[in-house]
Amino acid sequence: MITPVSPLDRLARPLRNLRISVTDRCNMRCRYCMPENEYVWLPRESILTFEEIDRVAAVFAHLGVSKIRLTGGEPLLRHDLPKLVALLARRPELTDLALTTNGILLGRYAATLAEAGLRRVTVSLDTLQPDRMLRFARSARHGEVLAGIDSARTAFGSVKVNTVVIRGYNDDEVLDLLEFARARGIEPRFIEYMDVGGATGWSGDQVVSQREILELVARRYGPVRQVESAGWAPAERFTLPDGTVFGVIASTTAPFCRTCDRGRLTADGTFLLCLYGERGLDLRELLRGGASDEQLGDRIAEVWRQRTDRGAEERAALPARGVLHRIESLRADPRREMHTRGG
C-alpha cells in the first residue's frame, strides 16, 4: 500500500483530520449553536448518501487524512448510522474514527456503534442541572444524556465530555463538571464560547477564558501542570496534582489556527477549510457529475494548497468583535450555520 502524502496549505499545515457532518438536524436547541425557533433545513435529496461519504472518505484518506469525526447536527438522528461507521471502519488508513453527540440517543446506539468499529465518543454536556438544560437547550432529556454517557463508558475505550463555558449560564459548574468526569474516569474539556455562525446572541463579556478556568481549578485543587502534546490538537491538556487530566480549548482568546490540520464536510457535501469559512468546494456536484476518484483528489488537494484560512485569529484581532452572522444571513445560506458544518 502506498503511504498517503498530505498536501500542505500556504501556512505549511497538512490535511490530516476531517469532520463529517452527516445531518443538519438536531433534537436540542443550544444557545451557542441553534438558539432560534425556526431553521431552513438542507434539502433531503442534497444530503450525501453513506456510499458517497465512504467514497469521499477514501479519497481524503489517500491524501493523508487518518482521523475522521462524525458530527451533525446530531449525528445519531441519521438513520442507520452504524452502517456508515462499518463502511469507514474497514479502511485501515483511517486510524481514528470518532463521534461527537449530545448523548440523548447514545444509550440506544452505543453498543451497536462500537461493534461497527467506532473507536471514540465525545458527548456535549453543558450542565448537570436538568432545569438549566431545559432553559438553555429547550430539552427535558437530561437523564438520557447521562445514561448515554454511562453506556459509552461501557462500550468504548475513550470517552470525553465537552462543555462550552458561558458566563452567567454555567460558569459556576466548571468544578462540578470536572468532578463528574473524574468520578467516572472520563476526560472533560472546557471550551471557550465562540462567535460562530449559530451563536446569534454571542458577546465578548460572556466568554470565560482559559486563564480564568485554570485559575478556578487551581484554587480548588492546587497547581495545575500542562501536558506536553504534539501541538496539532485543539485542546491544551492539563493535570491536577492527583493525575486527573482535563482539557481547555481556548478557541476565542488564544486560537490554534496556525496548527489547524482539519477540514470540514457539510451534510450536503461542501468541503470547508475553516469553521469560519465563507466558501467551500462542492464535492456533491463532482460526485454526482461523474468525477473520478483521481479528479476528486486533485480538486481537494488544489483547494487545500491554496488555503490561508485562520478565521479565529482574524476574529480575535478585531477591535470591535460582535456577532458573526445575523439571523437573516444565516437563513439565506444554511451552510453558514454551526449545525451544518460539524462545529
Image: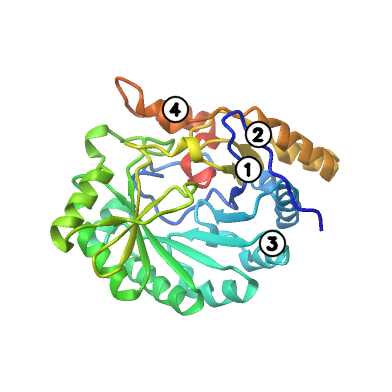
Residue behind mark 4: 328
Query: Callout 4: few (<14), some (14-19), or many (20+) C-alpha neighbours within 10 Å?
Result: few
Q: Residue 285 or 195: which is nearer the viewer?
A: 195
Disc 4 is placed on an element classified as helix
Q: Which amino acid does label 3 sit on?
A: Leu
Name the disc covering residue 88, or none: 3
Q: Determine the CA span between mark 4 and mark 1.
A: 33 Å
Q: Position of residue 154 (x, y in %)?
A: 46, 80
Residues marked 2 and 1 touching at CB (< 8 Å): yes
Dot placed on the residue nearer the N-terminal end, 4 or 2:
2
Q: Which amino acid does label 4 sit on?
A: Glu
Q: Is mark 3 on a helix, strand or loop?
A: helix
**Quick check: marks 4 and 2 in contact, CB under 8 Å?**
no
Q: In the image, is 324 to the left or to the right of 170?
A: right
Residue tagged 1: 15
State the SS at label 2. Answer: helix
